[in-house]
Amino acid sequence: MNKYVLLSFFVSFISFAQDAKEDKLKEKARIASTNLTWEGNQDLSENDFVSAEVDYRKAIAKSGENSTAPYNLGNAYYTNETYSEAFGRFKQAGELATAKEDKHKAYHNMGNVFMKQKAYEKAVEAYKEALRNNPKDEETRYNLALAKELLKQQQDEQDQNDENKDNQDQKDNQDQKDNQDQDQKNEGDNQEDQKDKDDSDKKDQGDEGDKGDENKEDNKEGDGDEKKEDQKKPEQGDQPQEQGQQEPRPNQLSKQQIQNLLEAMQNEEKKVQEKIDAKKVKGAKVKNEKDW
């Protein structure tokens, strides 16, 4: 026999032996994984969630071909309302499953998790995938119809909320614009009021100036009257004003001026009387007495 033939036969024998060994190990692992899965099921039936979780995790670690262990662990999480963990295990079961029915159950339960989370769009896709693996399942079909209806309501509510938000944003923008317009109007009114006040102040200053001119004119006229009165005073010089003496008002004589006028009149009257008396003496007839 050719040595090359013998070598090829020897290599094939070794490979066959290795494959057989590997298959034997895989089978042993599958059996161990199956047993652990069964123990987990027993723990769940006794409401021992912690022990069941441990058994299921060991079963998953033992064999990568056991889709039942992650599926059952996902159900345990779902029952305890740990939906995120449940989704991860259902997804793992769906990827490991080779039978269509196993895939159908995994995706169906994934849809249930999305329904609990109100992720209706994802639930619709999960139920559709479940029906692709088992189109005859009426429960999945019902859940798909329900998910579609809830998704429509959710989208309608979202559209309404978006519309309300847009309307509110428009209202807020309009209110802001109105407030700005009102602020500008108030600022304009304040400026107008200030301008009116300034004009009024200027007018008042002008009126005071006119009054000052009038007072100056009155004082000027009064000074003229006083000068005229002084000219009328005979033998009257400038009289010094005593401290505390009131200034005579225009067209009104002071006591001193009246006293001076009276004295002047008395002097004039005295002079006139003296002139009259002189004339009488001068014009009197001299009586001639006889010289007897």
Image (cartoon, rainbow, N blue to C red):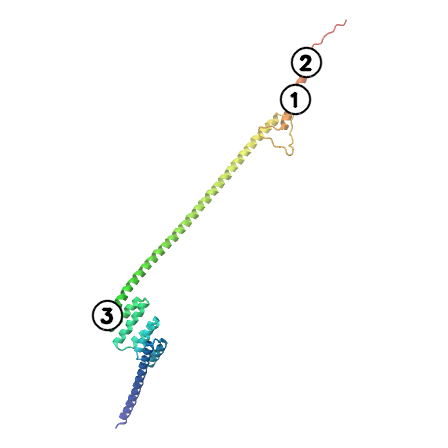
- Location of mark 3 (residue): 138
200 up-or-down from 80: above or below: above
Mark nearest the camera among 2 and 3 is 3
**Residue at x-position 27% and y-position 70%:** 127
Q: Nearer the viewer, residue 18 or 268?
A: 18
243 up-or-down from 97: above or below: above
Is disc 1 placed on a helix, strand or loop? helix
Q: Quadrant of the C terminus?
A: top right
Q: Residue furthest front?
A: 46
- Location of mark 1 (residue): 266
The percent coordinates of residue 274 (x first, y second) are 68, 18
115 up-or-down from 36: above or below: above
Q: Nearer the viewer, residue 173 or 64?
A: 64
Q: Number of callouts in the render?
A: 3
Is disc 3 placed on a helix, strand or loop? helix
**Residue at x-position 29% and y-position 72%:** 109
Three-letter amino acid code of the residue under disc 3: Glu
The percent coordinates of residue 228 (x first, y second) are 59, 27
Residue 67 visible in rendering: no
Distance, label 1 to label 2, CA atoms, is 21 Å
Three-letter amino acid code of the residue under disc 2: Lys
Three-letter amino acid code of the residue under disc 1: Gln
Which corner quadrant of the image does residue 153 belong to?
A: bottom left
